[in-house]
C-alpha cells in the first residue's frame, strides 16, 4: 500500500521484486506481493539458508539468491526493497551494487528512522524513485487500528507529515 500510495502509476506486478532480508517483514511483504500478482520475487539474505527457507515456504515464484548472484538479478529488478535493519538510526547502510540495478527500478526501505535512509539516498542519487519506510509503518497500523477500534483510518498526506515531523522536526513535505 505504501508503494502504491507513494507512486500511484507504478505497477508492482511488472518485472521482478528483489527483497533484501529474510525476516518477518519479508514474509509479510512476500505474501502481499504474491496476492497482488507479482510473478517473481527474489530474496537475498546474508544467511542464505534463511532466504532459502522463505523461498521453499512460498513456492515456485519465490527464489533465494546468493550474494554472488545479486548483481545479475538486480539488472532485472523492477522493485528493490530493503527489509534489513541496516541503516536504521543512521547505522551503516547495506552495501548494494547499485550499478547493476535496472535503471527504472523503484527502491523502497521499511526503515523509517531516519526518514530518508542512506540506502534511499544512494538510490535517489542514482536517479531511482524511492519509497521511504514511514508510509509502510502507517499502512501497517491501519489493520490493527481497525481491528481494535472498529474504525479504519486513512493514511493521508497530513497524517504522514504529522508523524514525520515527530521523527524529524525539520521535515518538509
Image (spheres, rainbow, N blue to C red):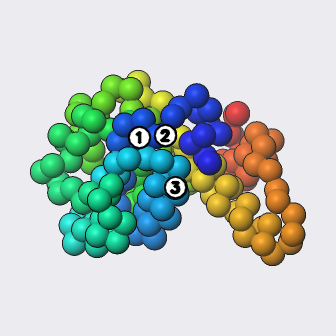
Which is nearer the N-term, disc 3 or disc 2? 2
Describe the element under mark 1 as helix, strand or loop: strand
Estimate the spatial distance between the alpha carbons at disc 2 and disc 1, rounded to whole Å.
7 Å
Report whether 166 appears left or right of 28. right
Describe the element under mark 3 as helix, strand or loop: helix
The residue that mark 3 highlights is 35
Residue 140 location (% of width, % of height)? 65, 61
The residue that mark 1 highlights is 79
Which one is nearer the viewer's eye here, 71 or 34? Answer: 34
Identified at 53% across, 49% down, the residue is 36
Q: Label 1: how many residues lie within 10 Å, few (<14), some (14-19) or many (20+)? A: many
Q: Nearer the viewer, mark 2 or mark 1?
A: 2
Q: Label 2: how many residues lie within 10 Å, few (<14), some (14-19) or many (20+)? A: some
Q: Quadrant of the C terminus?
A: top right
Q: Is residue 6 above or below residue 20?
A: above
Q: Quadrant of residue 17?
A: top left
On residue 12, the disc is 2
Describe the element under mark 2 as helix, strand or loop: loop
Q: Nearer the viewer, mark 3 or mark 1?
A: 3
Which is nearer the N-term, disc 3 or disc 1? 3
Residue 12 location (% of width, % of height)? 48, 40
Residue 171 location (% of width, % of height)? 68, 39
Estimate the spatial distance between the alpha carbons at disc 3 and disc 2, rounded to whole Å.
11 Å
| Residue 12 in sight here | yes
Identified at 19% across, 41% down, the residue is 71
Which is nearer the N-term, disc 2 or disc 1? 2
Report whether 68 appears left or right of 112. left
Amino acid at each position: 500500500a505504501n508503494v502504491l500510495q507513494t507512486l500511484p502509476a507504478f505497477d508492482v506486478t511488472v518485472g521482478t521484486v528483489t527483497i533484501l532480508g529474510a525476516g518477518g517483514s519479508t514474509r509479510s511483504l512476500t505474501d502481499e506481493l504474491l496476492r497482488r500478482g507479482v510473478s517473481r520475487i527474489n530474496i537475498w539474505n546474508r544467511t542464505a539458508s534463511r532466504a532459502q527457507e522463505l523461498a521453499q515456504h512460498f513456492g515456485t515464484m519465490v527464489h533465494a539468491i546468493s550474494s554472488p548472484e545479486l548483481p545479475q538479478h538486480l539488472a532485472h529488478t523492477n522493485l528493490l526493497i530493503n527489509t534489513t535493519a541496516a541503516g536504521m538510526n543512521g547505522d551503516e547502510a547495506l552495501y548494494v551494487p547499485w550499478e547493476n540495478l535496472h535503471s527504472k527500478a523503484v527502491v523502497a526501505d521499511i526503515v523509517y528512522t531516519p526518514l530518508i535512509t542512506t540506502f534511499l539516498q544512494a538510490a535517489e542519487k542514482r536517479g531511482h524513485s524511492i519509497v521511504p519506510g514511514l508510509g509502510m509503518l502507517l499502512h501497517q497500523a491501519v489493520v490493527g487500528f481497525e481491528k481494535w477500534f472498529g474504525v479504519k483510518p486513512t493514511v493521508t498526506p497530513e497524517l504522514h507529515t504529522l508523524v514525520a515531523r515527530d521523527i524529524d522536526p525539520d521535515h518538509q513535505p
